[in-house]
Image (spheres, grey):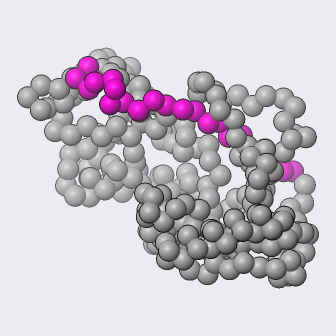
Amino acid sequence: GLAIARALALKGREVVVIERNPWIGNETSSRNNEVVHAGFLYPPQSLRGQLCHPGAQSLMTYCDARGIELARRGKLILALDDAQAAMLETMLEAGAACDVSGLEILPPASVRQREPELQCHAALYSPETAVVDSHAYMLALQGDGEDAGAVIAFNSAVTRGSIADDKPTVSVASADGDMDLDCDVVINAAGLGAADIAHKFAALPSEHVPKMHYSKGRFMSYGGKVPFEHIVVPLGDTLAMGGALTLDIAGRAKFGPDHDWVEEIDYDLPDGLAPQF
């Protein structure tokens, strides 16, 4: 949402961001591993395959220009057998098709040269994978947008929407009272709440609103001395159970995410997960 607001404001549009929380990045954007993916994980013909690599390059260029902390830590994806090694070959081919540079498959000895504590059958090395200070990035987007005239209405929630003569109206409830905003364009960038927002527009048939499927991923921080300098990602069941290790800007490590389908949005972290991770 902040990136869209920034882009439109810089083009001279009058922009209002409706934000139900008291500050930016209070939901999905504050709950991720801050990894900037290089762009080799997706089929080249897919939208992810087409957009991930150029998006990562644009993001890193922006961060470098604005002095936003960014660490190009690199990633090692580990294969433990021949079948997983074949998966690495597929990723290597996808990366080449998406113009990702620097990818290479390393034998065990080369992996140990980079990370002496790692044992594996082979590994795919991605030097372009980075981590970013996501909050500093969001603050920069907010600042750019506001400098260009965008306004963020915090503690404001969309209650309904209507369309008349091809002009949308958004009804908003806030601490200052309720109001109706007449718009030329409404952009629904509400993340996990996007389907709920869409359903509030009576003129939009419900069959055109995609059903949400929630996959919950949990992270756990690691308090010991970190033996790695790269992001380390296993494959198979180990990955799904939270076995990936990510280093943040400060060099602190966390495991995760794991993967669990849930019926509703729930940010609770149950007890007893540590042995799994």
Q: Which residue is pictured at 12% across the width and 32% down the height?
A: 166
Left or right: 108 with respect to 264?
right
Residue 177 appearing in the image: yes
Q: Image quarter for residue 11? A: bottom left
Q: Which residue is pictured at 25% across the width and 37% down the height?
A: 186
Q: Which residue is pictured at 45% across the width and 58% down the height?
A: 46
Q: Which residues are magenta?
A: 202-223
**Residue 8: x and y, percent?**
26, 53
Is residue 140 within the magenta segment?
no
Placement of 231 over or under 9, stated as above or below: below
Q: Image quarter for residue 110? A: bottom right
Is residue 206 within the magenta segment?
yes
Q: Image quarter for residue 246? A: bottom right
Residue at the farthest left position: 165
**Residue 73: x and y, percent?**
69, 70
**Front in this rendered view, residue 148 or 125:** 125
Quadrant (top left, top right, bottom left, bottom right) of the N terminus: top left
Residue 73 appearing in the image: no
Left or right: 19 with respect to 100?
left
**Residue 147: x and y, percent?**
31, 54
Q: Which residue is pictured at 17% across the width and 26% down the height?
A: 163
**Front in this rendered view, residue 158 or 206:** 206
